[in-house]
């Protein structure tokens, strides 16, 4: 840490007396930065809430392709921290803030169960996508597969419930068909 920062050990310890203080400062800064990046990506994607939700997938792809993905720093810190630590408090606040914003955006997009959709999208910001979804550097049709979990017409449920789905538009149906065609011709594991 000292070598990477380029400061003397004594300087670092003046600003951060403990490892916990350093981790908390990092998480606070990451919370502000990551939240701003996601909100900016949503705004750049368009005026409509569906466009904004869709833009989040592009932002995740860009961020993870650019930096690689080594796991969510909030999850990593929370797992290692004491139950009453500041790192856990910051992680909980970050998660609640993100979830609240995604829920509001999902409501505006017309999701039947905005809370559930927000949780699902939130998981994509903290967990790597499964291997069968393609790598971050794969062609865009592979990267878009997780997005179809939100937009594509669901498999009929015997109860008729499709709570987290947003009703697909004609464009979404065409994208889902394209995704299905790719899936049927792909050698990727399922």
Image (cartoon, rainbow, N blue to C red):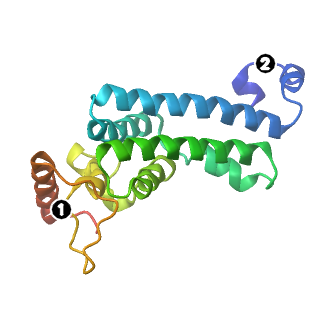
Q: Kindly tell me whether residue 80 is visible in this rendering.
A: yes
Name the image quarter holding residue 13.
Answer: top right
Residue with the mark numbered 2: 7
Residue 179 appears at what percent x and percent y?
A: 17, 55
Q: Which mark, residue 183?
A: 1
Which mark is nearer the camera, 1 or 2? Answer: 1
| Furthest-bottom residue in this view | 158
Position of 88 relative to 16 (above/below):
below
> Regarding mark 1 in the picture, which secondary structure is present there?
helix
Residue 7 appears at what percent x and percent y?
A: 78, 18
Image quadrant where one finds the N terminus: top right
Which comes sooner in the sequence, label 1 or label 2?
Answer: 2
Position of 153 relative to 135 (above/below):
below
Position of 15 relative to 48 (above/below):
above
Q: In this view, does 104 lie to the left or right of 148?
A: right
Circle 1 residues within 10 Å: few <14, some 14–19, many ≥20: some
Give the camera-side residue of 30 and 9: 30
Q: In this view, does 109 lie to the left or right of 36?
A: left
Q: In this view, does 82 lie to the left or right of 53?
A: right
């Amino acid at each position: 840490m000292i070598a990477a920062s380029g400061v003397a050990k004594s300087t670092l310890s003046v600003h951060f007396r403990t490892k916990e203080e350093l981790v908390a400062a990092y998480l606070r800064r990451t919370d502000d930065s990551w939240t701003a990046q996601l909100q900016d990506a949503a705004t750049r994607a368009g005026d409509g809430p569906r466009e904004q939700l869709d833009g989040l997938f592009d932002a995740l792809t860009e961020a993870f392709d650019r930096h690689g993905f080594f796991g969510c720093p909030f999850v990593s810190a929370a797992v290692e921290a004491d139950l009453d630590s500041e790192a856990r408090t910051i992680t909980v606040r970050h998660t609640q803030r993100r979830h609240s914003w995604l829920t509001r955006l999902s409501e505006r997009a017309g999701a039947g169960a905005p809370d559930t959709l927000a949780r699902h999208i939130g998981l994509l910001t903290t967990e790597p996508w499964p291997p069968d979804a393609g790598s971050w550097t794969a062609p865009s049709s592979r990267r878009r597969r997780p997005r179809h979990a939100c937009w594509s017409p669901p498999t009929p449920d015997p109860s008729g419930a499709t709570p987290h789905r947003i009703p697909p538009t004609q464009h979404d149906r065409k994208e889902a068909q394209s995704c299905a065609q790719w899936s049927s011709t792909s050698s990727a594991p399922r």
